[in-house]
Image (cartoon, coloured by chain):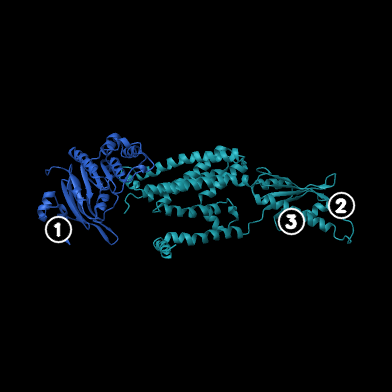
Amino acid sequence: MNPRRTLAITGRLLAQFRHDHRTLAILFVTPLVILGLFALLLRTDASDPRIGLVVDGTDDPLAEAIGMAFLESERVDAVAVPSAAAADRDLRAGELDGHVTIPTADDEGVLRPTIVLEGTEQRDLALVPAALQEATMRALAEAAPSLPPGAPAPSLPRVEPAMEVLYGAEDLDQLDLFGGPFIGLVVFFLVYVVTSVSFLRERSQGTLERLMASPLRRAEIIVGYMLGFTAVALVQAVLVIGFSLFVLDVYNAGSAWLILAIVVILALAAVNLGIFLSTFARNEFQAVQFIPLVIVPQVLLSGLLVPVESEPEWLQVVSNALPLTYAVEGLREVMLRGADLASEVVQLDIAVLVAFAVVAVIAGVATLRREVA
Amino acid sequence: MTAATPLAIDARDVRKRFGGVEALAGIELAVPAGMVYALLGPNGAGKTTLIRSLVGLVKVDAGELHVLGARMPRREVLRSIGYMTQAPALYGDLSAEENVRFFARVQGGGDVEWALRFVDLWERRGSLTATLSGGMRTRLSLACTLVHRPSLLLLDEPTVGVDPQLRAQMWDGLREMAAGGTTIFVSSHVMDEAERADRLGLIRAGRLLAEGTVPELLARAGVDRLEDAFLSLTETDR
């Protein structure tokens, strides 16, 4: 190995960076932005789940004690609610994330509290039973404060909580909760990358110049591209959704057609965004560099990993400007809550995605200039 | 050519700057319809910029450009123009025939078989373009340029990489098209190619230095070879 020849390679590489400030910026700035976002998401105290508490067994001191301890729990934001019916109404209205009812002990002396959760928040499924468990332990400990050392432990009252969920099923696993949003992410990512690189090839191989010197209108080029890639994206969406629902058995309470509609509209937005952004890249290398800028913030901020509501407010503004956010919300509404087109949330999500696709196509036509200079 | 012959290209005091470089410094050019006109000049003389401004890819800073009677840029006129870029601009993952067919459709129709036979690629029509040799790609690019039978052909160094025999064959074909009324505007820095033109323009540093038939230019410079005439005529301007 000749050090001079080796260093010639090294030197040339570093010299090239001098003329490519964009690559340097992406190399040095992107990781800081991504890690910063991560920190914001993970360090921000997510608001505790709001749980209504109904104590039915007012004459049962243990039920009372567990209720008191639950209200003081630091894991949940518990509020006393007069009746199970009221709690249920608030849960359906979205004012509560769940409710806990503590009855008197049954004939066998077993206390059977019930936990009802909204069901689509994985965190709550673990957190609320744990909080109730903790409250129960504290109540039991306080009920028997002064046992002489060495004395045999008295038989403790049995407490056997049961859990129900409003949407989905109790046995939803991570894949059920993340599957829908992931369908959206996978389709968005691949469609975006393929479109932006292929549109860029049109430019780099010189054929775009040829098209621009033909009677074609700019809108004809862009819309032609859009239709072609949307056709491919449609096939891809059918495959991905079919595989998720029928092979992976991802939970779906809604219509598969509605899922398809949301995913295809998202793909349309991805196609148009790919065309639009590729006009800012001079070569494939630069188009690839856009990927972390376009994809990573969407993965982090779309509500896929951390609910948008638990982000700092200024970051929610960013989240609400990203198309994937609406796809994630729409897919969760349909697949986990069984929402249909009558749902205002789904209507809004679809409307925003369509608007995004339209704006991106107009931006693409506007930035595709006939004269290059 | 009589005075009554309409002009296919009419450039009046066309100027274009790229930053500090004056690519076109007041070009005056009149090419009558049906003529084979060669624009001869060294690299960076402004040949490509001029051709690209003729199809509206370059927005000129000043001056007037009329192509086929219309003031450019004008989209409708592009239907009657065939523009061949300097590097073959083709889809490598389409067959030769698919490339020609695509450009025919974009231009609103054309004779695919005629175009492929014109460049002697009919037998290779099924080959994937990426697998063709450099010279074949250049010829295929020409086929894509003339498939819609335009009345004006703008060819930017069209025979680079094409062997002499095929080059002669291509020129026979182009001459035939010119005889049929097609105007052919060719840029080149190859002298023997320029000699095939009816009329020559010598361009350097964005300026048209001399213009005329080959014998006229030779006579003006007082030399026997076009190459010497070019050197002598561009020298005087320096």
Residue nearest the viewer, comparing A177 with B184: B184
Left or right position of B172 against A41: left
Q: SS at mark 3?
A: helix
Q: Nearer the viewer, residue A231 or A167?
A: A231
Q: Report the side of A261 relative to B192 (left or right).
A: right
Q: Nearer the viewer, residue A175 or A267?
A: A175
Mark 1 sits on what residue?
A: B232
Is any atom of residue B56 visible in this view?
yes
Please tell me which of labels 2 and 3 falls first in the chain. 3
The x, y position of residue A299, in whole percent, is 54, 52
Q: CA distance from mark 1 to mark 3?
A: 100 Å
Q: Is residue A82 left or right of residue A320?
A: right
Write down which chain is painted blue. Answer: B
Location of residue A204 in the rendering, given as x and y in whole percent from the top left corner: 37, 50
Amino acid marked by disc 1: Ser
Distance between the alpha carbons at the discs numbered 2 and 3: 26 Å
Instruction: Return the residue at label 2.
Output: A155
| Image position, residue A373 (x, y; %) | 31, 54
* Camera-side residue of B210 and A258: B210
Chain that appears cyan: A
User: Which of the 4 image quarters holds residue A342?
Assistant: top right
Task: Establish if A23 lies above or below A60.
Answer: below
Q: Which residue is mark 3?
A: A71
The amino acid sitting under disc 3 is: Leu
Apparent side of residue A233 relative to residue B92 in the rendered image (left or right): right
